[in-house]
Each structure stands twice: as structure tokens, then as C-alpha cells.
Image (spheres, helix red, strand yellow):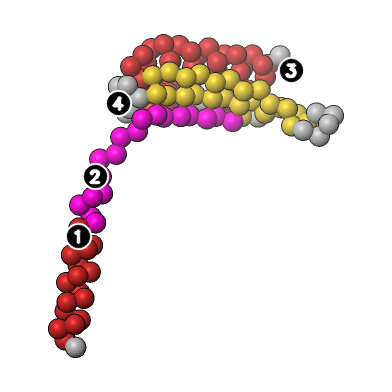
Amino acid sequence: MKNLITSLCLLVFTLSFGQASTIKKNSDFESFGIKVEVDSAEDLEKTFKIENIKDLLSITTVGQDITLQIICNGEKMSNGVNSSLSFKIKGNTSKQEEFIADATKIRKMALKHFNSK
């Protein structure tokens, strides 16, 4: 009985260590997405700043796809559905300055949308 328990323990140990070596230790992301959903211009100004995008881009590696989406929630329409407006850009971390410029543009457009109401 003692030999059977020892053998089973050794088998479980061997299998568990064999599985651990197949786990990938370094994970790389192929894409990165940011989604901001706001209800007012004040919310947008508080939660979404271009400096935050720059900080996030600084921790990514070159060549990753990146997506930014701003969803502006509106009021309930006559048919009972909530209105919304969405802005979305796609880019790559190898062209960070272009992505930041596009992010600045859609932020301004979203603020303009809220302020035009």
C-alpha cells in the first residue's frame, strides 16, 4: 500500500511539473484597445485626457495594433431607445504621433457634439 501511494505521488508530481514547463512565461499582446463611454462633456474632459493615451502608448511595444473608441451617450428617443454617437480610430504603435493626433481630433469632435446640444 505504501508503494502504491508513493508511486501515485511521484506520478502526479511528474505530470504537474511536465505541464508547468509548457506554460508561456512572457505574454505579448498583438492588439490594444481603449473604449471610453461618457454621458456629458464634463465626463469626457475628466476621464479622457491625451496625456493618458501617451502614457499607455509608452508601455506598449512597437508594431502593436491599437484602437480607440469614444461613445457619447445621449438622451432617450421617442421610440424608447437611447441615442448614442461613436467615434473610433485604429492605428499602430509604430506611428504613435499620428495616433495621438487622431485621438486629439476625435476628442474635440466628441466635445463639440456635446456642446452643440
Residue 108 coordinates in the image, percent (x, y): 57, 14
**Nearer the viewer's eye, disc 1 or disc 4?**
1
Looking at numbered disc 3 in the image, what kind of residue is underneath it?
Answer: Lys
Dot 3 and dot 4 residues touching (CB under 8 Å) = no
Q: Give the magenta range.
A: 19-37
| Of the image marks 2 and 4, the number of the one nearer the N terminus | 2
- The part of the image, by quadrant, that contains residue 53 is top left
Looking at numbered disc 4 in the image, what kind of residue is underneath it?
Answer: Thr
Q: Determine the residue positioned at 64% across, 14% down.
A: 112
- The residues bearing labels 3 and 4 have C-alpha atoms spaced at a distance of 40 Å
Residue 23 coordinates in the image, percent (x, y): 26, 49
Which label number is shown at residue 17?
A: 1
Label 2: which residue? 25
Q: Determine the residue positioned at 40% across, 29% down.
A: 31
Magenta residue check for 67: no
**Nearer the viewer's eye, disc 1 or disc 2?**
1
| Of the image marks 3 and 2, the number of the one nearer the N terminus | 2
Q: Nearer the viewer, residue 12 or 68?
A: 12
Dot 1 and dot 2 residues touching (CB under 8 Å) = no
Looking at numbered disc 1 in the image, what kind of residue is underneath it?
Answer: Phe
Label 3: which residue? 117
In the rendered view, does 111 fall on the left or right side of 34? right
Magenta residue check for 25: yes
Assign the N terminus to one quadrant of the image: bottom left
- The residues bearing labels 1 and 4 have C-alpha atoms spaced at a distance of 32 Å
Looking at numbered disc 2 in the image, what kind of residue is underneath it?
Answer: Lys
- The residues bearing labels 3 and 1 have C-alpha atoms spaced at a distance of 62 Å
- The residues bearing labels 3 and 2 have C-alpha atoms spaced at a distance of 51 Å
Q: Which secondary structure, mark 3? A: loop
Q: Which secondary structure, mark 4? A: loop
Q: Determine the residue positioned at 20% across, 58% down.
A: 18
